[in-house]
Each structure stands twice: as C-alpha cells, then as structure tokens.
Image (spheres, rainbow, N blue to C red):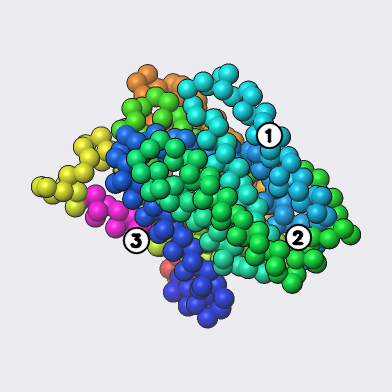
C-alpha cells in the first residue's frame, strides 16, 4: 500500500515538492553540522540558544502576518498597500520596540538587539515567501521560507570569521535576500492583482498568530531552557543530537503535506470512510520511512562505539536514544495534528501544543538535577503527552484513529478468516 501511495505521487506534481522538502531538510541539517564543526560545541551551543530565541520572537513579532498573507492573497484575494505595510512592517516594528524596552530589564545578559534584528529579518523573508506563493511560485517560495533563514545563518557564521556578531551579519544577509525577493514580487505581472487600492484591510489574525507562536516555541523550548541551565558545551551537544534525531521525524512533514488535501476534502464532504483512509495513508507514509530512518540512526550510533570513532560519551548516547524515542512517538501519531487542524479541531491542536510546553516546563521544575539527559527526557515526555492527548480528543470527537494503531488494526482485520 505504501509503495502504491508513493508511486501515485511520483506521477503528479507532488514528487518535485517532496524532493525539494527532503533537500531543504538536508541543507538545514548540513548547515547545523557545519556550524558545529566550524564553531566548536561551546560556541555552537551559545549560537543555538540565541538563534532559537530569534526564531521564537520572529513568530511573535510577525503577529500571524505570513499565514495571513497566504490566506488573504490566495484564490483571487487582494490587500491594499497600506494593509500590506501595516502587517509586514509597522506592527512588527512596534512589537520589536516593545521587546527591546521590556526584555533587557528582565534578562540583561542576552544580546536582545541582535536577536530582534535577526527575528525581523526572518519575519520579512517569511512574509515575502507567502507573497511569492500567492503569486504562483510554489517551489521557490517553499525553499525561501524553510531554508532561507538557516542558509543565511550559515553564511553569517562564515562571514563573521570567528567574531561574535553572527546574528548581525545574518540579519544583513536576510535583508539582502528579502530585498531580492521583494523586487521579484514587484516585477511580477500579477502583483497589481493582489496588492491594489481596491483590496481589503485585513484584521490581525490572533488565532493564526497564537498557533504559529506555539509551534515555534515548542520546537525551540528545550534548547532555550537547556541553554539557561547547561554549560555551553552541553547545550551545543544537545542541540546537535536533537538535529540528528529530528531527521527521523522528517516523514511526518511529508505525510502532512501529502494528506492535507484529501483529509480536508473528505471532511468537507462528511465522508468518514475517506477521512479514515486518508489518515491511515498519512500514518503509513510516515511510519515505514520513519522506522527505516530510526534503524539508520541506531546503526550510526553503533558505529560511534567503535575504537577511534567515539564522538561523545555515554551521556550523549543516552540523550540520543531518548530524543530518538521522542521522534518515533511523533512518527507514530503523524496524522493526528493534520486531521485535528483540518477537521474543525484546530483549537484543540493549539491547546495540545500549549499543553506540551507547560508539561515540559513543569517536568523541568520537578527535576532535582538538571542535565542533558533529564532535559531530553522532559522534552520527549512532554511531546508524547501532547501527541497522545490530541489523539484521544480526535478519536473521541471524530471517531478516527489517527495513530499507527489504525494500521495494526487494519492488518489484523485483514488476517481474520471470513
């Protein structure tokens, strides 16, 4: 069944986008490995923390603008130039100013100016990627949104040449990229059709804003909190190991992208059988490649135990295994977030993300001795709680099993004698 799913995808326009998604992940992974090798684990750990803060604050100052633009400008929609400027520039700069006034008084040791400058650059690139998507650029816009900031960070680290102003140089690189993207958008023939005085003035999308902030915060919270309690070297190793184990969860994003349309279509028609089938396809697409990647990761870990190839100690091995288990949980419940988001349960999906963050912070608060191992355990447990909790809600509200259990049940049923 999985082979037939992927065979069908390769016959359509999905294959280039899937290959691009895999390439983007490979590029981002290579950049992080290169940064760790270039800077050393201690400096890489410090950079991982402040970069994580820049990513989180980019979603905060954006006020939902990238998703708003994608929503408002699609399917023939248009905005006024004033509304575009407000959501892309004015509102974010106001929030940057508020942040620069308030946060240094609370956390004086952090470099807030570089963090917010980089955050604003990430925000601009994300907004322009949404506009490019609305103008018809599917692949370039995806690459700009998902790989642009990470590549800019890599270039910033190289151009900094060992100095501490990596984020400032990264922001300059992001500004150049954003400028080129803006010129491309302005020169498109379709530009006047989406940005026009007859367009509408969109309101600030608080729901989209909250969802994007929670998603970004959940992706970075363990690295940021870890950076506050661990040494720079420990934080660097932890961030590196999490990047490696995140590769196991790569099929989750592929499954989400592939099944979004059939899930939404089945829900729109009220076809429960098709919805269950689309959900099962998502689980299948994520599970089998995820298990293969997990086996590769374990083989790689076994290789590092050989004489002369030892990269980290026993603590690093344990952190790797815990984070790998957490990634497998995400793979096992791959279809849950997609179904919840597209089938009228988006608020529960947001609550699940918030619950995972609160659970992580609560577990960290209960830990008597904070270490990379306990940090990994708290994060993996919190992610699992959020995934399982949302799965239970979807199962009860929609009657659809969005976990890998559905595949086992279907296989067991097919084996029963008639």
Task: Give the image quarter of residue 292.
Answer: bottom left
Of all residues, the one furthest to the right in this rendering is 198
Which residue in the structure is indicated by mark 3?
Answer: 292
State the predominant SS element of the stretch in magenta: helix
Can see residue 88? yes
Q: Are marks 2 and 3 in contact (CB under 8 Å)?
A: no
Task: Give the image quarter of residue 64.
Answer: top right
In this rendering, is residue 220 above or below 106? below
Which residue in the structure is indicated by mark 2?
Answer: 73
* Neighbours of disc 2 within 10 Å: few (<14), some (14-19), many (20+): many
- 3D distance between C-alphas at marks 1 and 2: 24 Å
Which structural element holds mark 1? helix
**What percent of the width, then of the height, locates residue 41?**
30, 38
Q: Do the residues labelled 1 and 2 touch (CB within 8 Å)?
A: no
**Residue drawn at x 26%, y 41% as measured from the top left:** 317
Which residue in the structure is indicated by mark 1?
Answer: 95
Which structural element holds mark 3? helix
**What percent of the width, then of the height, locates residue 78?**
81, 60
Q: Looking at the image, is mark 2 or mark 3 earlier in the sequence?
A: 2
Task: Give the image quarter of residue 183.
Answer: bottom right
In this rendering, is residue 242 above or below 409? above
Q: Which of 407 and 221 is in front in this view?
A: 221
Q: What stretch is highlighted in magenta?
A: 290-302
Which structural element holds mark 2? loop
- 3D distance between C-alphas at marks 1 and 3: 44 Å
- 3D distance between C-alphas at marks 2 and 3: 39 Å
Q: Looking at the image, is mark 1 or mark 2 earlier in the sequence?
A: 2
**Of tags 1 and 3, which is closer to the observer?**
1
Can see residue 1? no
């Amino acid at each position: 069944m999985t082979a037939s799913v992927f065979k069908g995808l390769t016959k359509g326009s999905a294959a280039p986008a899937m290959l691009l998604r895999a390439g983007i992940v490979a590029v981002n992974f290579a950049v992080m490995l290169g940064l760790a090798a270039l800077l050393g684990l201690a400096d890489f750990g410090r950079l991982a923390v402040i970069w994580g803060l820049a990513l989180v604050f980019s979603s905060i100052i954006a006020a939902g603008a990238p998703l708003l633009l994608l929503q408002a400008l699609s399917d023939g929609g248009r905005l006024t130039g004033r509304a575009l400027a407000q959501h892309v520039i004015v509102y974010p700069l106001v929030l940057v100013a508020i942040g620069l006034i308030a946060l240094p008084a609370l956390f004086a040791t952090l470099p807030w100016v570089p963090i917010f400058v980089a955050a604003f650059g990430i925000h601009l690139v994300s907004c322009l990627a949404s506009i490019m998507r609305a103008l018809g650029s599917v692949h370039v816009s995806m690459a700009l949104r998902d790989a642009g900031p990470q590549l800019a960070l890599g270039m910033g680290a190289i151009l900094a040449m060992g100095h501490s102003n990596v984020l400032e140089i990264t922001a300059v690189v992001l500004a150049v990229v954003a400028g080129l993207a803006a010129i491309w958008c302005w020169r498109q023939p379709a530009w006047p059709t989406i940005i026009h005085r007859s367009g509408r003035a969109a309101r600030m999308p608080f729901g989209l804003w909250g969802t994007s902030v929670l998603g970004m915060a959940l992706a970075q919270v363990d690295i940021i909190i870890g950076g506050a309690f661990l040494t720079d070297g420990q934080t660097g190793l932890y961030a590196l190991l999490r990047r490696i184990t995140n590769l196991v969860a790569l099929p989750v994003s592929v499954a989400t992208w592939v099944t979004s349309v059939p899930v939404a279509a089945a829900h729109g028609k009220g076809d429960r059988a098709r919805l269950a089938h689309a959900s099962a396809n998502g689980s299948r697409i994520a599970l089998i490649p995820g298990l293969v990647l997990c086996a590769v990761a374990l083989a790689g870990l076994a290789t590092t135990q050989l004489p002369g190839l030892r990269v980290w100690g026993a603590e690093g091995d344990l952190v790797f295994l815990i984070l790998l288990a957490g990634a497998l949980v995400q793979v096992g419940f791959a279809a849950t977030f997609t179904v919840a988001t597209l089938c009228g349960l988006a608020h529960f999906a947001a609550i699940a993300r918030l619950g995972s963050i609160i659970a992580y912070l609560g577990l960290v608060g209960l830990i008597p001795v904070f270490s990379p191992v306990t940090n990994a355990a708290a994060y993996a447990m919190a992610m699992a709680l959020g995934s399982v909790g949302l799965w239970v809600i979807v199962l009860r509200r929609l009657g659809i099993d969005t976990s890998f259990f559905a595949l086992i049940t279907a296989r067991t049923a097919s084996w029963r004698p008639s």
